[in-house]
Amino acid sequence: MTQKNWLTVRDALSEDIRLGRLATGDQLPTEAELADRFEIGRHSVRRGLEALARDGKISIEQGRGTFVAEAPRLSYQIGRRTRLRRNLIPQGVEVTSELLSAKRISAPDAIAKALLLNSGDLVIESQRITLANEIPVAFGAAFHCAARFPDFAERRDLLGSTTETYRSFGIEDYLRLQTSMYARPAKVDEARTLKQHPDVPVLVVTAVDGTPDGTPISTSRVIWSSARVTFTMEQSDGR
């Protein structure tokens, strides 16, 4: 037995995934079964699986098992007209999103400032999760002025896109006014929601969108899996 047995597990299973012998969603054998297959100890198996999980190839779900969760690394372009579906669908990705919750809250100071509201004004907080080919890539919250967009979350769910929802409120175009991002270690609940290894960092993206005259209409804070997306900054205005 050598100290590199875990590499055998990592490389063999990675090759199985690459060649399609293991497909996204497939459940892997148990640690004991893998130990028998490779004739190594369970500690080496566990280390190999953790390496695959850090690479984003598998998801280790407590109480359920280990599943293939490899997703293509997505390219997401941030510019003046940043649009989720316009970014991802041309890459051959099936984009879906799910509304997790929607509620009226008093705007915290930072949200009120971003939307040019008074502190304490009511806003709609919509929590959503975004999936690419059924694999979670991001989740977070968007905030809209409740007086201007009283049923934004419901319309967004009905119409299926943010752009169409704004059109239903008479807004034909909107721009990205501000974007900031930083990386940090994932919190336990974030790693669980994104079905990624706890050691994989997340990217926190905060944005403000507004009408062409510069009036803010939304602000958002979204947690992205750093293993599943690469952000690029657009140099033109996206016209």
Image: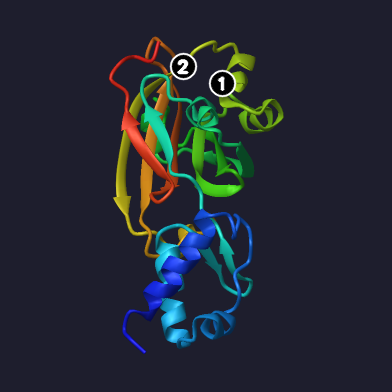
Q: Residue at x 44, y 42 (%)?
A: 222
Q: Amino acid at mark 2?
A: Tyr
Looking at the image, which residue is at 59% across and 78% down? 30
Left or right of 15 on screen, residue 126 = right
In the figure, is residue 207 to the left or right of 63?
A: left
Dot 1 and dot 2 residues touching (CB under 8 Å)? yes
Residue at 46% x, 79% y: name it: 45
Dot 2 lies on which element? loop
Asked whether residue 119 appears in the rendered view, the answer is no
Which image quadrant: the N terminus? bottom left
In the image, residue 36 lies at what x, y percent? 55, 85
Instruction: Please state if 175 lies on the left or on the right of 232 as rendered.
Output: right
Sequence-wise, the earlier of marks 1 and 2 is 1
Observer-nearest residue: 6 or 238? 6
- The local crowd at label 1, few if under 14, some if 14 to 19, many if 20 or more residues have their Cα within 10 Å, is some
Name the quadrant containing residue 116.
Answer: top left
According to the picture, the residue beneath numbered tag 2 turns out to be: 174
> Can you say whether 6 is above or below 123 in the image?
below
Q: Tell me which residue sits at (48%, 45%) in the image.
A: 72
Real-space CA distance between mark 1 and mark 2, rounded to the nearest whole angstrom: 8 Å
State the residue position of label 1.
Answer: 163
Q: Is residue 131 left or right of residue 54?
A: right
What amino acid type is highlighted by mark number 1?
Answer: Thr
